[in-house]
Image: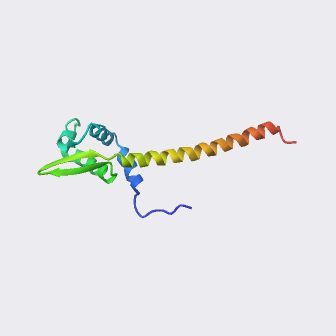
Amino acid sequence: MMAISEGPSDLDQTLLALADPTRRAILRLLVQGEARITELARPFGMSLNAVSKHIRVLERGRLVRRRRAGREQFLTIDPKPLDDAAAWIEAQRAAWTARLDALDALLKSDDAAGPPE
């Protein structure tokens, strides 16, 4: 039985950050390279404050890093949490594939044995 953690895990925070289309769009912009927060806010029809809230969620998910240079703030993407989430998803997929393959084999063996007498 799995223990329930005290707070959200890194994976939880990463998946929460990825759950919103605006945050995914911000990440797509950051794939092109480092950007100022004001540059990232420009394409969205929302206030700078609203975009900053999205960025804080991305930071809690460890998906972006902030760098300050004077009064300017720059963001870069950190792909490691995406790699970690992809590895977790792949492990889950592999486990379920193995379970479903075992069930399929069992059902085929039952079919081959014929009806019970």
Q: In this view, does 107 lie to the left or right of 10?
A: right
Q: Where is residue 112 in the image (x, y as percent from the top left)?
A: 79, 36
Residue 32 falls in which quadrant of the image?
top left
Q: In this view, does 68 lie to the left or right of 12?
A: left
Q: Position of residue 81 (x, y in %)?
A: 38, 49
Q: Is residue 20 left or right of residue 104?
A: left
Q: Which residue is located at x 77 percent, y 41 percent? A: 110
What colour-coding does the image apply?
Answer: rainbow
Nearer the observer, 45 or 24 = 24
Nearer the observer, 65 or 117 = 65
Q: Residue furthest left?
A: 70
Q: Which residue is located at x 37 percent, y 53 percent? A: 13
Q: In this view, does 99 lie to the left or right of 114?
A: left
User: On the rendered image, what quadrant is the N terminus found in?
Assistant: bottom right
Above or below, 42 against 85 in this view is above
Nearer the observer, 8 or 80 = 80
Q: Where is residue 100 in the image (x, y as percent from the top left)?
A: 63, 42
Q: Residue furthest right?
A: 117
Q: Residue furthest top?
A: 43
Nearer the observer, 11 or 65 = 65
Q: Where is residue 27 in the image (x, y as percent from the top left)?
A: 30, 41
Q: Which residue is located at x 42 percent, y 49 percent? A: 84
Q: How many labels does the image show?
A: 0
Above or below, 49 against 112 in this view is below
Q: Which residue is located at x 59 percent, y 42 percent? A: 97
User: On the rendered image, what quadrant is the C terminus found in?
Assistant: top right
